[in-house]
Amino acid sequence: MKIIDYKYIEQLLERYWQCETSIQEEQILRSFFSQEKIPAHLLPYKEVFVYQQMQQEEVKLGIDFDAKVLAAIEVPVVKARRLTITSRFMPLMKAAAMVAFVLTLGNVAQHSFLGGDDLDYNYETYKDTYNDPEVAYEKISSALMKVSEGIHKSQSKLSSDSLLKVNNPKDSVTE
């Protein structure tokens, strides 16, 4: 190349450092610096353009690059969950429980703030329903015996049920 051509290369270099060159002009610079004979004042720039060219030759995408990228960004398949009736109505049940809780608190607060005058804690005003204490004792002891028998029956049923579960563990799992 002649001196005039070197001036053109220097102008291209200035434009290159200011990021004003086109792709064709950068290609001209790469081809110029890939030559064997380069003027001494332009030698420091040779490594930049030769390095870029070597990097472009080294970094090549494989044939399967597109397939790998598409496989990585493919939309995953969403599996449907099985919804049961209880899981569908669970929010409704929670809301109903909260409403029941708030209404109960409101009822208790209303009863305690308005004063339940109908409750009588004066034990002196209580009247006996039976004139004979022996009859009253008989009635209360028969009522307590019935309660005791009911508790005994329920406890024996619970213990027999638990013995059945211990003897048949397969049945207790399926219940």
Image: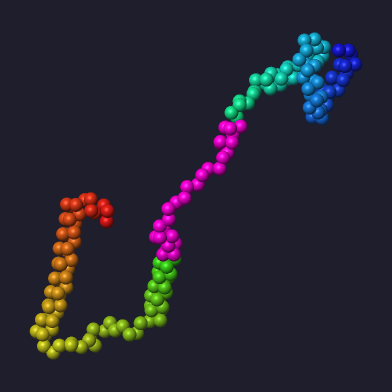
Tell whether position 89 is magenta: yes
Image quarter of residue 9: top right
> In this picture, which residue range is highlighted in magenta?
66-94
Q: Nearer the viewer, residue 161 or 63?
A: 63
Which residue appears at 45% of the width and 51% of the height? 81
Residue 32, above or below 73: above
Image quarter of residue 22: top right
Residue 119, above or below 148: below
Residue 44 rendering spot, x and y as whole percentages: 77, 16
Which residue appears at 86% of the width and 22% of the height? 11
Residue 141 rendering spot, x and y as whole percentages: 12, 77
Which residue appears at 15% of the width and 67% of the height? 153
In the image: residue 102, left or right of residue 42: left
Q: Which is the main secondary structure of the residues drawn in magenta?
A: helix
Residue 60 visible here: yes
Image quarter of residue 35: top right
Residue 123 rendering spot, x and y as whole percentages: 23, 84
In the image: residue 155, left or right of residue 2: left
Tell whether position 77 is magenta: yes
The quarter in which the C terminus is drawn is bottom left
Which residue appears at 33% of the width and 85% of the height? 118
Residue 44 visible here: no
| Total residue callouts | 0
